[in-house]
Image (tube, rainbow, N blue to C red):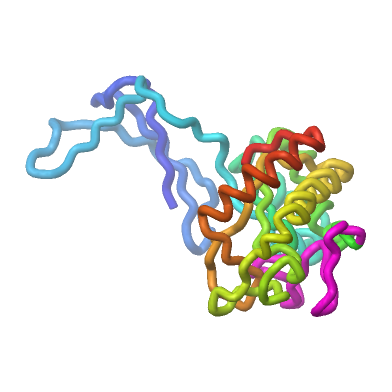
Amino acid sequence: MTLGACDSATRPSRNDVVEVVQTTRDLSQRLTHLAGLRFGGPLPTGVAVIHVDDAVRYQPVTGVGGAITDTSAWLLHNELPPRTRAAVMANLFGAGGIHLGYMRVPMGASDFTKGKRPYSYDDLPPGQSDPSLSRFSVAHDDAYIVPTLRQMLAINPHVQILASPWSPPGWMKANDALGNPAERGLLLRSAYGPLARYFVKFIDAYAARGVPIAAISPQNEPGQQAFYPSLDLPEPEQATFISHDLGPALRAAGLRPKI
């Protein structure tokens, strides 16, 4: 992978220098600075030319990052010796590394879960429900997910976190399960209110653990048909859920994450 950056804020000219940083597949080069390149020669003919005008601004880029899933957090926290883990985290989030600034965190299990056992924060046996969320707990995350996120924030306190559920608890869905095979995992209308409070409890629980949530999305890949955690939540239902339940619940709790 090679990344380049032009040092000029104007149209490229023959004097513009492009910085080249390369990481090879075999990792023999890791963020290695190579010799700079320069633009040169006349504009080509017979091919498409893209003119970039950086004086025209559209939506800003909040940050660049990735996702910390159950398995990636477990690998970082449990499988790496402390010195190696510190070096990896510094390379990921430190100013001397690639300095990632935006990370997504699943609310509960995703399709990458240690032990291959999916979970939510309010799991119950089939046929039972908990609309008051009295059984809600993020204790599962305390072992290695929260410590990994805390270490990330200790290195770069400006990292913003986006939280997304792959599935709400099974009892909130028509199929009473975390998966969505054959699109049978619809969100029950009676669960809109409990799911909104589920978001509030998650944000509050993570904040109490020193991990602030900057943004949320109602659902990861809505409509994905899978046996791993997934949910069928079409756009009209999302709009209703956000406007009638999620937004009001967040405001009532004094929370203002981006949605």
Residue 125 in sight here: yes
Task: Tell me if residue 168 comes above or below residue 246 in the rendering.
Answer: below
In front of the other: 76 or 129: 129
Q: Is residue 115 magenta?
A: yes
Residue 91 visible at all: no
Q: Residue furthest right?
A: 134
Q: Position of residue 90 (x, y in %)?
A: 70, 45
Q: Residue at x 31, y 20 (%)?
A: 10
Image height check: is 127 above or below 43? below
Residue 73 image position (x, y, % from top left): 74, 59
Give residue 91's position: percent from left, percent from top. 65, 46
Q: Residue at x 66, y 46 (%)?
A: 216
The dominant secondary structure in magenta is loop
240, 14: nearer the viewer? 240
Callout count:
0
Residue beneath the point at 52% across and 59% down = 234
Closer to the camera in the image, 184 or 54 = 184
Would residue 153 appear left or right of 55 to someone viewing this image? Answer: right
Q: Which residues are magenta?
A: 109-134
Snapshot quadrant of residue 15: top left
Q: Position of residue 9 (x, y in %)?
A: 37, 21
Report which quarter residue 42 is drawn in: top left
**Which residue is located at x 82 percent, y 52 percent?**
146
- Does the magenta-highlighted stretch encompass residue 7? no
